[in-house]
Image (cartoon, rainbow, N blue to C red):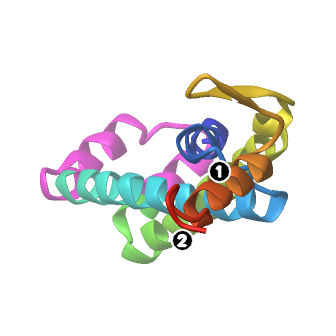
């Protein structure tokens, strides 16, 4: 999950050439975490629904009926109740998005460390000089006019 935020920043930097500050890295990590959570939530919810409909909870309860740990029975009851699943999904949302934000912040700090990079055979010191060069070329008058 940390890797998701980190690589989101890494690939953004690689594709656009723009450096991200810490806030932008956190934001990109958060967006990545929200997308990851959406995928996990859909898969987990589908699993719980299929598991409850097919009678999987009863099978698990019969296997763990003699379990000495009361947390096992509590976990099985959580899977049966809708509110328990909703609370679990909220905790999962916080966990996934926070780890992705950490990855995005690390990516923002570590990805732009290289002082020089090559693009199209031309070396630039940083992304700002490349942008300035692009603006000069775009705003330059045509060759024949002055």
- Looking at this view, is 105 or 80 the one in front? 105
In the displayed structure, 140 sits above or below 134; it is below
User: Percent from the top left, x then y, of residue 6?
Assistant: 66, 40
Residue depicted at x 79% and y 38% = 112
Is 36 left or right of 39, judged from the image as shown?
right
Residue depicted at x 78% and y 48% = 129
Is 107 left or right of 42, judged from the image as shown?
right
- Looking at this view, is 61 or 52 the one in front? 52
Name the front one of labels 2 and 1: 1
Q: Distance from label 2 to label 1 (Cα)? A: 20 Å
User: Percent from the top left, x then y, of residue 98?
Assistant: 70, 57
User: Percent from the top left, x then y, of residue 52?
Assistant: 22, 57
Is 37 left or right of 101, judged from the image as shown?
left
Q: Is residue 127 magenta?
A: no
In the displayed structure, 21 sits above or below 109; it is below
- If you read the primary sequence from the N terminus, does the residue marked by circle 2 or circle 1 appear first? 2
Q: Residues within 10 Å of mark 1 (few under 14, many from 20)?
A: many
Q: Residues within 10 Å of mark 2 (few under 14, many from 20)?
A: few
- Looking at this view, is 21 or 90 the one in front? 21
- Looking at this view, is 1 or 107 the one in front? 107
Q: Which residue is mark 2?
A: 87
User: Percent from the top left, x then y, of residue 34?
Assistant: 51, 63
Q: Is residue 68 magenta?
A: yes
Q: Secondary structure at mark 1?
A: helix
Circles 2 and 1, Cβ within 8 Å, touching? The answer is no
Residue depicted at x 66% and y 27% = 122
Quadrant location, the N terminus: top right
Residue extending farthest bottom:
83
Query: Start and end of the magenta stretch?
Result: 51-76
Q: Where residue 100 is drawn, which disc sits there?
A: 1
Residue depicted at x 56% and y 56% = 33
């Amino acid at each position: 999950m940390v890797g998701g935020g980190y690589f989101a920043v890494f690939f953004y930097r690689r594709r656009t050439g723009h450096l991200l500050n810490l806030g932008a890295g956190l934001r990109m990590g958060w967006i990545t975490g929200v997308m990851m959570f959406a995928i996990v939530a859909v898969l987990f919810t589908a699993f719980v629904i299929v598991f409850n409909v097919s009678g999987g909870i009863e099978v698990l309860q019969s296997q763990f009926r003699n379990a000495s740990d009361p947390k096992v029975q509590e976990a099985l009851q959580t899977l049966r109740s809708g509110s328990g699943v909703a609370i679990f999904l909220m905790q999962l949302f916080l966990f996934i998005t926070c780890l992705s934000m950490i990855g995005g912040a690390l990516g923002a700090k570590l990805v732009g460390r290289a002082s020089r990079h090559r693009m199209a055979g031309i070396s630039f010191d940083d992304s700002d000089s490349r942008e300035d060069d692009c603006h000069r070329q775009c705003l330059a008058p045509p060759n024949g006019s002055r």
